[in-house]
Amino acid sequence: LSNPDLVVVGSGFFGLTIAERCASELGLNVLVLERRYHLGGNAYSEIDEETGIEVHKYGTHLFHTSNKRVWDYVRRFTDFTSYQHRVFGKYQGQVYSLPMNLGLINQFFGKAHTPDEARELIAEQSSEIATADATNLEEKAISLIGRPLYEAFIKGYTAKQWQTDPTELSADIITRLPVRYTYDNRYFNDTYEGLPVDGYTAWLTRMAEHPNIEVRVDTDWFDVQDEFKGKVPVVYTGPVDEYFGNCEGRLSWRTVDLEQETVDVDDYQGTGVVNANDQDVPWTRVLEFKHLHPERTYLPGKSIVVHEYSRFAEDDDEPYYPINTAEDRAKLLKYRDLAKKEPMVLFGGRLGTYKYLDMHMAIGSALSMFDNKLKPHFSDGAPLT
Ligand code: FAD
């Protein structure tokens, strides 16, 4: 594309949704710039040649949504399996089913409680601290679920996730800690859930298949911006602070290190995700991808396992989860002001808005940007702000 009508920076779900809508519905020529060697952003996956297992390169990605519009949209590009996500947690040599539910409570306290008995038990244990009086994350969690469950299932995991003792973390980090007084252990409550039948990359590639879309990988916006800035409308989905040269300081993120190995067993842990709730186990989770697609055929006797470690992101790390301290929020307001004033550039996606977005949220928010900003601009000449 020598003369694109629109440049999209970043080929994650946000950027590809914008590109697809603008090409298919408005007939625009869209150039997508991607600095990684592949399209797809963090949802990208690769099939391991030896074992045939689909590896989610940036951590397990589970698709779920209750947004009918998003569900109808995504099914234009892929069918979904009937996979339902379930998570288990290992603590002191036992495996419990999460999220906290009646099964976990009964196993942990070694007694069969009815739902009402369990509710009473947790109410009594959590009465130790009133939620309104909680001054840190530990107190808040105890006020919601009581000390025994907090110490087993929240304390160690949270300390590892944040590399900080929960007594030093803000109470605001958690608003609720849902406990289910049933045996329901489905991880997500959404209406629609499943995994793309032929994988994430096939889905993401189909979104970019329109002849008016060119995806240029290995291309960093900052190396080519002079060609486009101020001349062509841009949708930027990279980090907002980086766009402005970090002039207000860097926004802080957590990252994860993923240590992947191929193991010589057919089945390593019997399920896709097992959390490590013990504080002295250094990883936060163990992922075993083959369980996400039990319908597929794999090389027998082998599996791929990933140990996930959480830590604060340094300058060159992948930014994964916004930390969102008061200082970050103050910086973000300044970046938002700058973004509003930036001519012909719209900011979107999880990096462009400094917000954790699930895939369905990134897609939903891109559809809204298309409806509310891009379509009015390109169809009716509305200003692009
Ligand atoms: P991204 O996918 O991050 O895409 C942004 C793209 O922009 C990247 O490819 C990046 O390389 C590119 N880029 C940045 N700067 C530049 C530049 N200067 N020039 C060119 N390109 C640039 N969601 C779920 O729904 N379910 C899950 O189970 C789930 N699990 C997750 C697990 C982890 C560890 C993480 C981090 C996220 C998870 N998500 C999950 C969220 C999901 O990854 C996001 O919703 C999705 O990535 C958002 O898409 P995006 O387009 O906004 O951003």
Image: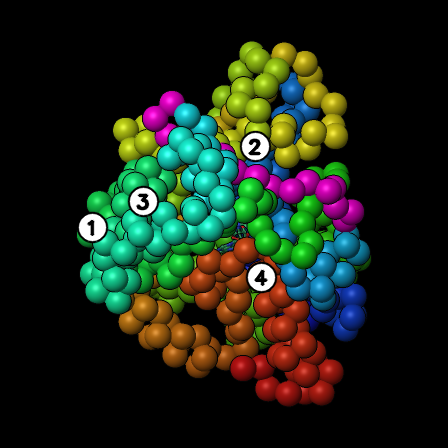
Q: Is residue 210 above or below residue 269?
A: below
Q: Amino acid at mark 1?
A: Thr
- The spot of residue 299 in percent (x, y) is 69, 16
- The spot of residue 342 in percent (x, y) is 46, 77
Q: Is residue 80 above or below residue 273?
A: below
**Residues drawn in magenta:** 78-93
| Residues under numbered marks 4 and 2 in contact, where contact means CB atoms less than 8 Å apart | no
**Secondary structure, magenta segment, majority class:** loop
* Mark 4 or 1: the one toward you: 1
Q: Mark 4: is the Cβ under 8 angstroms from ligand 1?
A: yes
Q: Is residue 231 visible?
A: yes
Which mark is drawn over residue 272? 2
Which mark is drawn over residue 167? 1
Which mark is drawn over residue 150? 3
Separation of disc 2 and disc 3 at Cα? 24 Å
Of labels 1 and 3, earlier in sequence is 3
Residue 332 is covered by the magenta coloring: no
Residue 83 is covered by the magenta coloring: yes
Q: Residues within 10 Å of mark 4 (few under 14, many from 20)?
A: some
Q: Name which residue lies at 38% across and 45% down.
A: 255
- The spot of residue 229 in percent (x, y) is 52, 70
Colour approach in the figure:
rainbow
| Residue at mark 4 | 361
